[in-house]
């Protein structure tokens, strides 16, 4: 008898069950266990937890194992932001000046005081067009009669007071890509830089790399990449650094590859924003004699990005006379972009903003503390279930269990911001990261699935809600599917993922 108990206990451990967990006798449990036992998931780490809103547990599979969630972290970040700030919250950017205004001339500097708005100059459909924003800033000058500026136009990003814009938990090869751009207190085009790349004339030659947008004439680029033979892999990568106006391309770009836009990082978002406003004013007849620049985290004015520049002290915020401000789109719209497009930049901005609104700094440590405090305020103890290291999920130091995701998702349904949160989640077949999922499936099936995807090398995660066909909210399925250590290509692993989600959807279909 003891031998049978021992074998049963070992079997429970191998399948991820605890000795106290009830084994669901659902069709989904059986179907997912079968998928789990075959390639390409046989040797991967797989956690699945699914419950109906009425409390009926459908699938339990290794639910307490903390796994790397990738962009599923955005579910936490956006939920915490909506709960703390409200769906109608808007970021504010102020225009102010030092010195005096005499006979139409500002004898001092003009400041763009960033408040963390991630949408300034953004390509998002919800973002306010750049020219509209710049015109509104110029109108603030005209209201007080400023027609000429003796000083400088300065982009001031000090609202986020951490000297590092990028998270220290991100890997080096992510830091040059646009999805690895870090937010500042004042941003521009999500602090990204686009390049157009075409192959060189022959294998071994350098590919052609041309900066496209935004215009950054202070930058110098070095191309160490080579043009690879036809039918080879594109391994081109870019490294930019906030320590100087230099960027470097390396890797290989195939000879037979068509030209494409490479999206890299622009570490000088506030500087770029000041340049565009400076140019905008100049072309509209407002002369800015002192040029443009930005303010460093140490409070120094920088008009030249080299280390050789002698830098003066910027004015303290309380000493700057504010003319007025512009505001971002609603947080509900920003959150929808964050989740539908899996926008890392927006997500990181939200977490930093939460920390600053809590009276803390925007440092990584304070952001982590703020996230944990927000979870605890919701009655969700993250102990042993959640370690949130950043806002976007780009760090592999994030660890969350499927059980914790389901608890969080259930909690969100009880909050006043539930409609905005639910409305932010992508749907298969619709615009967003889930658009290519379930090709050929009936539209009514796709419309029932509202979930966030998360992927990086070896990681595929999906968490969210499956609405019931009968429309009863109590029959909605809340689920989290987390796969780690699966390096199979997408075309091999997708059928397994689709099969798991379809099996779940059958339980309330």
Image: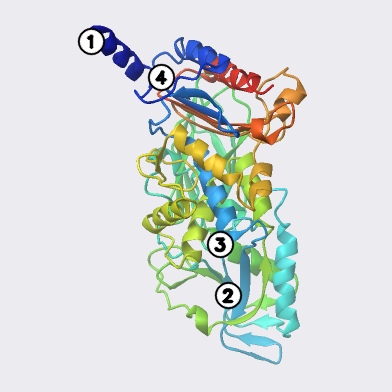
Q: Could you say which is closer to the camera, residue 254 or residue 98?
A: 98
- First in sequence, mark 4 or 2: give its number: 4
The residue under label 4 is: 44
In the image, residue 7 above or below residue 463: above
Q: Could you say which is closer to the camera, residue 108 or residue 341?
A: 341
How far separated are the C-alphas under marks 2 and 1?
76 Å
Residue most toward the left? 2
Badge 4 local density, few (<14 within 10 Å), some, or many (20+)?
some
Q: Which of marks 4 and 3 is in front?
A: 4
Can residue 217 be seen in the rendering of this structure?
no
Secondary structure found at label 1 = helix
The residue under label 1 is: 2
- First in sequence, mark 1 or 3: give its number: 1
Labelled disc at residue 177: none
The residue under label 2 is: 111
- First in sequence, mark 4 or 3: give its number: 4
């Amino acid at each position: 008898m003891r031998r049978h108990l021992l074998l049963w206990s070992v079997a429970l451990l191998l399948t991820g069950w605890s000795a106290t967990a009830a084994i669901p006798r659902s069709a989904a449990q059986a179907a997912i266990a079968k998928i789990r036992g075959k390639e390409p998931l046989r040797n991967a780490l797989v956690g699945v937890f699914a419950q109906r809103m009425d409390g009926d547990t459908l699938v339990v599979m290794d639910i307490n194992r903390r796994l790397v969630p990738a962009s599923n972290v955005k579910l936490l970040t956006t939920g915490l932001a909506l709960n703390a700030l409200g769906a109608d919250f808007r970021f504010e950017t102020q225009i102010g000046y030092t010195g005096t205004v005499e006979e139409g001339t500002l004898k001092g500097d003009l400041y763009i005081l960033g408040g963390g708005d991630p949408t300034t100059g953004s390509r998002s459909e919800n973002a306010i067009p750049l020219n509209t924003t710049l015109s509104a800033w110029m109108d603030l000058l005209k209201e007080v009669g400023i027609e000429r500026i003796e000083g400088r136009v300065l982009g001031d990003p000090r609202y986020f007071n951490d000297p590092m814009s990028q998270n220290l938990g991100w890997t080096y090869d992510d830091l040059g890509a646009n999805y690895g751009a870090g937010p500042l207190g004042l941003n521009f085009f999500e602090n990204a830089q686009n390049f157009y790349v075409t192959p060189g004339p022959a294998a071994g030659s350098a590919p052609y790399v041309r900066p496209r947008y935004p215009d950054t004439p202070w930058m110098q680029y070095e191309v160490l990449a080579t043009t690879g033979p036809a039918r080879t892999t594109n391994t081109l990568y870019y490294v930019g650094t906030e320590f100087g106006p230099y960027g470097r391309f390396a890797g290989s770009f195939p000879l037979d590859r068509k030209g494409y836009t490479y999206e890299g990082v622009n570490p000088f978002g506030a500087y770029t924003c000041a340049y565009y406003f400076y140019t905008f004013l100049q072309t509209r007849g407002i002369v800015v004699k002192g040029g443009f620049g930005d303010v460093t985290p140490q409070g120094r004015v920088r008009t030249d990005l080299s280390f050789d520049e002698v830098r003066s002290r910027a004015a303290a915020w309380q000493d700057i006379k504010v003319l007025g401000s512009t505001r971002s789109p609603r947080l509900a719209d920003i959150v929808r972009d964050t989740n539908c497009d899996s926008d890392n930049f927006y997500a990181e901005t939200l977490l930093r903003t939460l920390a600053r609104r809590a009276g803390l700094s925007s440092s990584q440590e304070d952001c982590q503390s703020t996230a944990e405090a927000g979870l605890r305020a919701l009655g969700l103890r993250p102990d042993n279930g959640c370690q949130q290291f950043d806002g976007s999920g780009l760090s592999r130091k994030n660890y969350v269990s499927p059980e914790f995701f389901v608890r969080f998702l259930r909690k969100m349904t009880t909050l006043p911001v539930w409609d905005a949160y639910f409305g932010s989640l992508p749907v298969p077949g619709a615009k967003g990261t889930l658009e290519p999922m379930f090709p050929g499936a009936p539209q009514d099936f796709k419309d029932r699935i509202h979930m966030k995807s998360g992927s990086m090398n070896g990681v595929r995660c999906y968490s969210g809600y499956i609405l019931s066909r009968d429309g009863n909210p109590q029959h909605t399925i809340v689920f989290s599917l987390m796969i780690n250590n699966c390096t199979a290509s997408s075309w091999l692993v997708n059928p397994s993922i689709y099969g798991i989600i379809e099996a779940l959807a059958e339980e309330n279909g």
